Image (cartoon, helix red, strand yellow):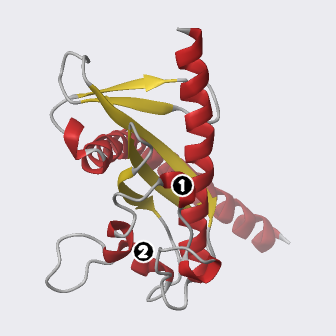
Amino acid sequence: MNNIVQLGVRLLIVCVLSAGGLALLNAKTSPIIAEYKRMEQEQARKEVVPAASAGLFVLRDSSTDLPYYEAYSDPEGIQLVGYVFNTVGKGYSSTMETVVGVDLQWKITGIKVTFQQETPGLGTKSTEIRYGETDPWFQRQFKSKPAELIKVDKDGGEIQSITGATITSRTITDAIRNNTKLLKEKVTAREKRS
């Protein structure tokens, strides 16, 4: 009986030390991870709206379910060139997060998948850069397409699905199309109020 108590106390000490160590590690790394994520999002906004890469991004509707950025080509915020928003959708095996840029005619200026944990060799091809190319082939297909009309080829659209990863392709495409529609409604309502 005495041995059981001693083993229990030792196990308790190990658990407390492990939990304390993990809590300390989390406290130290959380701010670093948050800053990295902020910088990654900032860089993604510049990539998806190249016309505003040296300009200004102004956050709008931050407390709503679809916050977005107005993208200006100049640092003073005079020349509006488009909008940037994030989409989130359920892929085959993970949540897919994408940053999307659209111009004033609601055509896609660029997209960047910023988070995915899809099946290696299938859904991960959404971020794959082929040999000899400089950007992901799947994401490049969206450029200059009317955002509200995009669909994957399996649904009669122009976006070529990733072989073996139709769900991933459809998730990204549908999230962009649906959120663009919502954003357009928001912007139109905002302009009417002004």
- Residue at 51% over, 71% down: 117
In percent of width and height, residue 13 lies at 61, 56
- The secondary element bearing badge 1 is classed as helix
Report the side of 77 relative to 184 (left or right).
left
Judge by depth and name the residue closer to the eye, 5 or 192: 192
Q: Is residue 38 left or right of residue 106?
A: left
- Residue 5 visible in the snapshot: yes
Q: Which residue is mark 2?
A: 126
19 shown above or below 155: above
Residue closer to the observer: 140 or 86: 140
Q: Amino acid at mark 1?
A: Ile
What's the residue at 38%, 74% (across, down)? 138
In the image, farthest residue toward the top: 194
Pointer 2 and pointer 1: residues touching (CB < 8 Å)? no
Q: Which amino acid type is marked by label 2? A: Ser
Q: CA distance from mark 2 to mark 1?
A: 14 Å
Residue denoted by label 1: 176
What residue is shown at x 23% (from left), y 69% (from top)? 135
| Residue 171 lies in quadrant | bottom right
- Against 172, residue 104 (above or below) is above
Report the side of 6 relative to 46 (left or right): right
Residue 20 location (% of width, % of height): 53, 48
Report the side of 2 relative to 125 (left or right).
right
Instruction: Answer with the quarter of the image where residue 51 lies.
Output: top left
* Badge 2 density bin: few <14, some 14–19, many ≥20, Cα 10 Å: many
Which callout, 2 or 1, points to the residue nearer the camera?
1
- State which tag comes first along the sequence, 2 or 1: 2
Against 55, is 129 above or below?
below
Is the N terminus in the top left, top right, bottom left or bottom right quadrant? Answer: bottom right
Q: Residues within 10 Å of mark 1 (few under 14, many from 20)?
A: many
